[in-house]
Amino acid sequence: MQQVAANTAAPAAPRRDPAPSRWSYRLHRLWLTPLFRLLLRVGLPMGASLALAVWYLGDPATQQQIIDKVAEIRRSVAERPEFMVRLMAIDGASDELGDDIREVLPVDFPVSSFDLELDQMRGVVEELDAVASVDLRIRPDGILQLAVIERIPQIIWRLTEDLELLDAEGRRVAALAHRMHRFDLPLIAGEGADAAVPEALALFAAAAPLEPRLRGLVRMGERRWDVVLDRGQRILLPEQGAVAALEQVIALDQAQDLLARDIAVVDMRNGRRPTLRMGAVAVTELHKIKAIELGENYR
Amino acid sequence: MTELYQSQRAMRNMRKAAMQRGVIAILDVGTSKIACLVLRFDGPGRMTDDGVGSLAGQSSFRIIGAATTRSRGVRFGEVDAMNETERAIRTAVQAAQKMANTRVDHVIACFSGAQPRSYGLDGAIDLHDTVVTEQDVARVLAACDLPDYGEAREVLHAQPVNFALDHRSGLGDPRGQIGNRLACDLHLLTIDMDVVQNLAYCIKRCDMELAGIASSAYVSGVSCLVEDEQELGAACIDMGGGSTGISIFIKKHMIYADSVRMGGDHVSQDISKGLQVPLGVAERIKTFYGGVVATGMDDREMIEIGGDTGDWEHDRRTVSRSELIGIMKPRVEEILEEVRERLDGAGFEHLPSQQIVLTGGASQIPGLDGLAPKILGNQVRIGRPLRVQGLPQAATGSAFASCVGLCLFAAHPQDEWWDFETPIERYPARSLRRAMKWFRDNW
């Protein structure tokens, strides 16, 4: 019997080359490059997730689904009874103004407080002429509370055809059907008169002694005031220092009874040279007197 | 000549760029092993408390990766089989990069072969001005007579060793000094061009840039000679696998380098032939049981040398250790005698100090410190490389002398010829510098 040698069965496998192949060497070097590592560690996951998100959200059906879902959740919260507003309460406004406000704010109660745009509603209400300011808030018991401060009419402005009520700052409050409805308020006229309402009010205050005869103020050329009295008398005031000029005239009137005489116009426009224009009768009389004084025959 | 000058300059710039970037690789292509170290430079050196100072710039870097692989395709320190060498380099570099966990693009390489030959040159000029300027240094370097070193050879190192101004010699840095005549001595080391080109090609195939090249004899001397040895004069014998490098230092400059084309591998071959064992077994026996001084004890110490032929008698062979020593000793003696011859030829006996330092892998043979003084003279010691930060324990032995030296060379390079300015006369006729010189001379 011949014995087969044990170690001839399997020839030794060729020894593996310990050297890395060129490509594995290059890949290893690439892998050790810091920028590449960063790109792979941060850039790749970021890019992949971004691409996934874009792919998913790019579908319009998905977008619609998401929008619907969000709207549904929002509605379910907004329609809870805690957030519902049932009625509107208006404080500090006359009935008429209250009706106007209800008209410009068409809100169908009950409504969720999420759907009320208070800033926008405030803007709408403040656009009303009669409203100076308004404070909107939703009370916890579901009431939309409007605290309104009304404009107070201080003066009447006569335009060519109709009358308007203005407040102390010259802002329009409302139209006026007839002068007699608000006889307590002073009257101004003329183009651009509303821009000088504070001055007009000061003049009216100064003209208190002339009150029984005072008809009103007329704005001339959008720059100065005329005081109009009955009998067609006028006091022409300068642009600057109108109140002082008026007080000067009133003082003259109180001292010498100036305005009771037949004078058509007191011209105070030039402060250093006040001028009087007499009425036609007075002028004739003056001429007569002069003629008598001179011994001439008048006429 | 200018071509090499430019390429050396380019390598120097690349080295600076790599140092700026902070990471550079060291590659020692030896006959028995290829070692790769990865250095990280982190700014100017700081003193560490374990006694490593900033002496030679070795505290400015740290070794963050080290790998060694068995060399293939290298004989006598020269590339013999390109592909094999390239693969071995790739293995070492990849492992070192893996350990450093960083990518290295620049490499400084050293090798021991290529038949280095030393030349001592000198040149002298009369100074234009009484003060020595950088231009004068450049001119005196350019004034050195270049010997006819042969067609297929290249300059590897060209280091100004000494400057003399009038009657004063031994100046390290003559700039700014006053005199009339400037002379300099230059040490030129040439090597075979093909060897460098082959190595450069291998490194290029590994996708790395060659940022410097050095002779391993020189860098071993840098790492193994202590400061006073370098100053007073000493020879460093780097006993490698395929060749033994010799470098002589004085005044901290290398003044001579040479190599003997014999090394540890020849000892292994002798053992292999003498004992009829494979080369790997011979290497192993040499490493474990080798020696060069036999004692009576060695006659009784039997070594199993084995074999796998299946013949019982053949596979159970033993030799005594003294037989092994009897094989190794003549070869080691031959190497040392060859070294002695080279040293004598270089005029080593005229140096003030006769210190000889043996290093390299083959210097670890036990008993070499007893054998070497008989041949080389009394002042012989076995040297180990300097300590550097981060070097693994396995790589601190004398076999890694040239690696460590190369690290020091990278951190603290010596000025070579191409690091100085180019003399203005060598510039092209229309250059701005030349115009400036004309103005300066004429006004």
Image: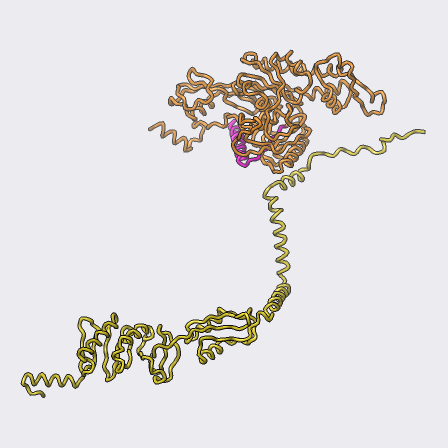
Res A201 → quadrant:
bottom left
Q: Toward which corner of the image does residue A69 lie, by quadrant?
A: bottom right
B333 vs B113: above or below = above
Q: Residue at x 69, y 22 (%)?
A: B265
Q: Nearer the viewer, residue B381 or B307?
A: B381
> With B187 as the anchor, is A203 left or right in this view?
left
Answer whether residue A58 is visible to the viewer in this image: yes
- Seen at 18% across and 83% down, the residue is A261
Q: What colour has chain A?
A: yellow
Quadrant (top left/top right/bottom left/bottom right) for the N terminus of chain A: top right
Residue at image coords 75%, 33%: A15
Image location of residue A193, percent across then percent down: 32, 75
Task: Tell me the quarter of the image containing the C terminus of chain A.
Answer: bottom left
The residue segment tinted magenta is B1-28
The answer to whether residue B438 is left or right of residue B10 is: left
Front residue of B226/A80: it is A80
Residue A50 in percent (x, y) is at 61, 55
Q: Where on the picture, by quarter, is residue A175?
A: bottom left
Q: Colour of chain B?
A: orange
Residue B252 picture location, percent across and down = 53, 20
Q: Report how many numbered discs are placed on residues in the image.
A: 0
Residue B72 visible within the image: no
- Residue at the limit of the structure toward the left, as seen here: A295
Front residue of B430 and A193: A193
In depth, the one of B346 and A256 nearer the eye is A256
Question: Which percent across, then down, holds residue B138?
Answer: 45, 25
Please state if B289 lies on the left or on the right of B139 as rendered. right
Q: Is residue B27 magenta?
A: yes
Magenta stretch, main secondary structure, is helix
